[in-house]
């Protein structure tokens, strides 16, 4: 189905069934399939915007022109060509932990890097 992807992966001897829905119409279909017993997943990711964030709010929009798929494809190209693709491999992130935060999930890292929206004031 266009906009729904499913997969099964085996991790440490356990098979995990997953689904990804792009757009709320596809999210509804996955939810209906789960509720009716037609589908059974261990993990479901819903991207409300068709194409994910590349098609979401804050993107440049021109009336009558939909470029989310092109924008998404370009972002994948940029990511694939980037020599540093994961934050834990970034020398600047490593230095931040070495010099300031200690280890991932440390008390200091948690205090400085995690936020609660309910605590925000605007």
Image: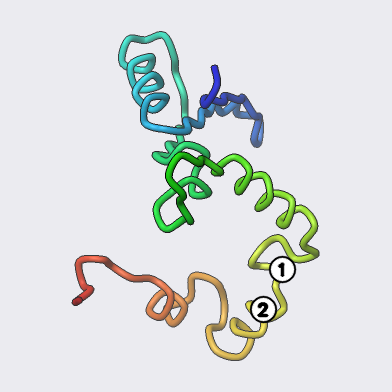
Q: Which of 117 and 80 is in front in this view?
A: 80
At a point 39% along the width and 53% down the height, the residue shown is 57
Q: Which residue is drawn at 28% across and 67% down?
A: 116
Viewer-nearest residue: 73 or 84: 73
Q: In the image, residue 99 lies at what x, y percent?
A: 61, 90
Q: Name the residue under label 1.
A: 89
Q: Mark 2 packing: few (<14 Cα in 10 Å), some, or many (20+)?
A: some
Instruction: Say if 31 sits above or below 52 in the image.
Output: above
Side (left or right) of 6 relative to 106 = right
Give the residue pinned by disc 2.
Answer: 94
Instruction: Provide residue 36's location: percent of width, then percent of height.
Output: 32, 10
**On the image, which quarter does residue 68 sit in?**
top right
| Discs 1, 2 touching: Cβ within 8 Å | yes
Dot 1: element: helix
Q: Which residue is drawn at 40% across and 21% down?
A: 30
Viewport quadrant of the N terminus: top right
Structural distance between the alpha carbons of marks 1 and 2: 7 Å
In the figure, is residue 111 to the left or right of 105? left
In the image, taking residue 20 as reference, residue 77 lies left or right, namely: right
Q: Give the mark nearer the N terminus: 1 vs 2.
A: 1
């Amino acid at each position: 189905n266009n906009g729904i992807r499913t997969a099964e992966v085996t991790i440490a001897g356990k098979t995990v069934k997953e689904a990804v829905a792009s757009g709320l119409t596809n999210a509804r279909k996955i939810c209906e399939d789960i509720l009716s017993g037609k589908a059974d997943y261990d993990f479901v990711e819903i991207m409300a915007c068709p194409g994910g964030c590349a098609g979401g709010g804050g993107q440049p929009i021109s009336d009558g022109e939909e470029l989310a798929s092109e924008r998404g494809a370009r972002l994948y190209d940029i990511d694939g060509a980037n020599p540093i693709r994961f934050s834990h491999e970034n020398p600047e992130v490593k230095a931040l932990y070495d010099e300031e935060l200690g280890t991932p999930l440390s008390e200091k890292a948690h205090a400085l890097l995690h936020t609660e929206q309910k605590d925000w004031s605007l």
